[in-house]
DNA sequence: TGAAATGTTGGGGCG
DNA sequence: ACGCCCCAACATTTC
């Protein structure tokens, strides 16, 4: 039974290759339309009108539209509330069904439920597909049918279950239907401004994704395990933004990771599936600890310390360099995400939710599932989180992962002249040397806003409440 | 996907 | 030669 018309609604899957919903629509319908909605329910909540993500999406849509036009179709780009725009467009086009790739965020699930309901009332179908994850829903479960909450057994089950079918490319050949529009709205027309993506060398769209992917395969992939922890080195893939917006297919990456036996990198891709699954099954992690006991922790109210953390002025060079990196380019090396998260929660005693929100507002690759998972991991409140007594020493981390201070000096230029021996803890530099080098701690660079050894003791005390329920 | 505290061992200085 | 002590170096435990 072939249907006449279908509509593919693109969201975080901005490509026309290996695309599950597009593939299914093409297989099912004679005429396939394509749309994207700049959803004001999302855009209105963004803190700035200069948002690199909106810019990235817009630039990627321009390329996607061009690709669809080469196939006889086009991208119908709307600006409004998706829960109203999609049913209205479906009605206008006279489609029998709307096709989407599944999204696991609570807000997206609520939106999709509302759209589905609206469509259903008009007899229009709403078909959802797994595309952004390798496994979703209940596909990877423990022996008794529960979702995994520990990564390693999840990973083992994930690998055991994996077959070639799970990694097969979704074919998307075939003609597309064209719907006359006034053309793609400009960035300004949807209320946003151009950003510095080009200056930062952030390539958009499928072509940008492919270029980065080639760079990674020709470069660090083979030595990923050895290089990935060193922020001064190009040792990681820089593909996170492309996975976030679907300008690259996850199946292609997993296939290659398996082919070259890049186990450490494959693990990272499995972590991504893991956190999608956790968010899907445990939506309370948005705003609450995965482990309820951890919501009894009394976090410190320290607005001035939080401001110093945000600005990269804590007096701990690696922490400051990392925060200045996110402030400068909207991206931070993964090792440093752990370091600054540990510092915020366990050195400053500040609620992980504040850090989570800061990352949400600043990361170009921000993804609710992984960001929340990572912060709760660092705060020890999450599933398979590090134990609360495992506290990073910001100086030791610096010595291990930026041994010569190359990364520090790149982002904290006022420390450029500090000798290697003191670059990780410059307050140890003798006063006379500080004067001679023109790097006086407290004048040219902040004194540490907290003493790590003391903070560690206070954190262990703060976390005592999770050990056992408060006595009656 | 830690780090600090504590325990153990063994080489070397020294009386 | 021997015991004693110091203290790296390494291992284990504790948080």
Image (tube, coloured by chain):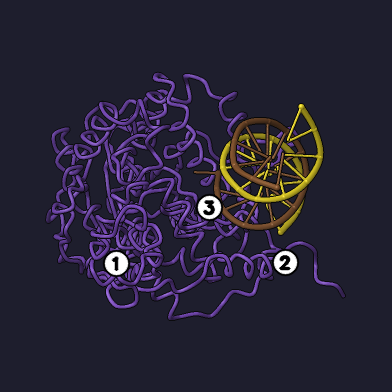
Chain colours: A purple, B brown, C yellow
| Disc 1 chain ID | A
Number of the label disc, if any, that sits on residue A433? 1
Quadrant in which the C terminus of chain A appears: bottom right
- Image coordinates of residue A139 in percent, x first then y, are 59, 34
In this orientation, which residue lies closer to the viewer: C8 or A392? C8
- Asked which secondary structure carries label 1, the reply is helix
Q: Earlier in the sequence, mark 2 or mark 1?
A: 1
Can residue A215 be seen here? The reply is yes
Q: Earlier in the sequence, mark 3 or mark 1?
A: 3
State the separation of the CA atoms marked 2 and 1.
Answer: 42 Å
Label 2, residues with CA under 10 Å away: few <14, some 14-19, many ≥20: some
- Vertically, is A35 above or below A252? below
| Tag 3–tag 1 contact (CB < 8 Å) | no
Label 3, residues with CA under 10 Å away: few <14, some 14-19, many ≥20: many
- The residue located at (65%, 57%) in the rendering is A389
In this orientation, which residue lies closer to the viewer: B11 or A124? B11
Number of the label disc, if any, that sits on residue A464? 2
- The residue located at (37%, 24%) in the rendering is A256
| Tag 2–tag 3 contact (CB < 8 Å) | no
- Asked which secondary structure carries label 3, the reply is helix
- Image coordinates of residue A225 in percent, x first then y, are 42, 32
The reply to whether label 3 and label 1 mark residues of one chain is yes
- Asked which secondary structure carries label 2, the reply is helix
Q: Which residue is mark 3?
A: A373
- Image coordinates of residue A52 in percent, x first then y, are 24, 59
- Closer to viewer: mark 2 or mark 1: 1
In this orientation, which residue lies closer to the viewer: A124 or A371? A371
State the separation of the CA atoms marked 3 and 1.
Answer: 43 Å
């Amino acid at each position: 039974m072939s249907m006449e018309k279908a509509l593919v609604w693109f969201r975080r899957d901005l490509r026309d290759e290996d695309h599950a919903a597009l593939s299914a629509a093409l297989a099912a319908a004679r005429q396939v339309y394509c749309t994207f909605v700049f959803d004001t329910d999302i855009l209105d909540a963004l803190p700035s009108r200069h948002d690199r993500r909106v810019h990235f999406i817009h630039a990627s849509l321009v390329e996607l539209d061009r690709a669809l036009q080469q196939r006889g179709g086009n991208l119908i780009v709307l600006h409004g509330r998706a829960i109203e725009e999609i049913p209205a467009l479906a009605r206008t086009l006279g489609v029998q069904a709307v096709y989407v790739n599944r999204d696991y965020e609570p807000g997206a699930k609520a939106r999709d439920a509302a759209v589905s309901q609206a469509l259903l009332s008009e007899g229009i179908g709403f078909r959802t597909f797994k595309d952004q994850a390798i496994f979703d829903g209940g596909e990877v479960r423990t022996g008794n049918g529960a979702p995994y909450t520990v990564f390693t057994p999840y990973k083992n089950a994930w690998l055991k279950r994996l077959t070639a079918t799970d990694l097969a490319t979704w074919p998307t050949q075939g003609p597309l239907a064209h719907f006359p529009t006034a053309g793609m709205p400009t960035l300004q027309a949807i209320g946003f401004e151009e950003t510095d993506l080009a200056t930062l060398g952030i390539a958009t769209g499928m072509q940008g994704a492919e270029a980065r992917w080639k760079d990674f395969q020709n470069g660090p992939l083979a030595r990923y395990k050895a290089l990935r922890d060193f922020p001064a080195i190009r040792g990681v893939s820089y593909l996170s933004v492309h996975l976030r917006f679907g300008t690259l297919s996850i199946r292609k990456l997993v296939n290659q990771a398996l082919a070259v036996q890049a186990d450490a990198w494959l693990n990272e891709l499995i972590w991504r599936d893991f956190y999608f699954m956790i968010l899907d099954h445990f939506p309370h992690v948005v705003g609450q600890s995965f482990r309820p006991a951890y919501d009894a922790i009394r976090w410190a109210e320290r607005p001035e310390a939080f401001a110093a953390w945000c600005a990269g002025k804590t007096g701990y060079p690696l922490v400051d360099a990392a925060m200045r990196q996110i402030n400068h380019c909207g991206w931070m090396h993964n090792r440093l995400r752990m370091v600054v998260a540990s510092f915020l929660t366990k050195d400053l005693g500040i609620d992980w939710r504040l850090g989570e929100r800061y990352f949400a507002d600043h990361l170009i690759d921000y993804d609710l599932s992984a960001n929340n998972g990572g912060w709760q991991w660092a705060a020890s409140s999450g599933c398979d989180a590090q134990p609360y007594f495992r506290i990073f020493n910001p100086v030791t981390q610096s010595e291990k992962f930026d041994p010569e201070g190359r990364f520090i000096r790149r982002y904290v230029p006022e420390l450029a002249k500090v000798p290697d021996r003191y670059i990780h803890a410059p307050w140890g530099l003798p006063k006379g040397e500080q004067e001679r080098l023109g790097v006086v701690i407290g004048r040219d660079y902040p004194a540490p806003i907290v003493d790590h050894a003391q903070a560690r003791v206070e954190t262990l005390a703060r976390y005592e409440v999770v050990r056992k329920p408060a006595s009656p």
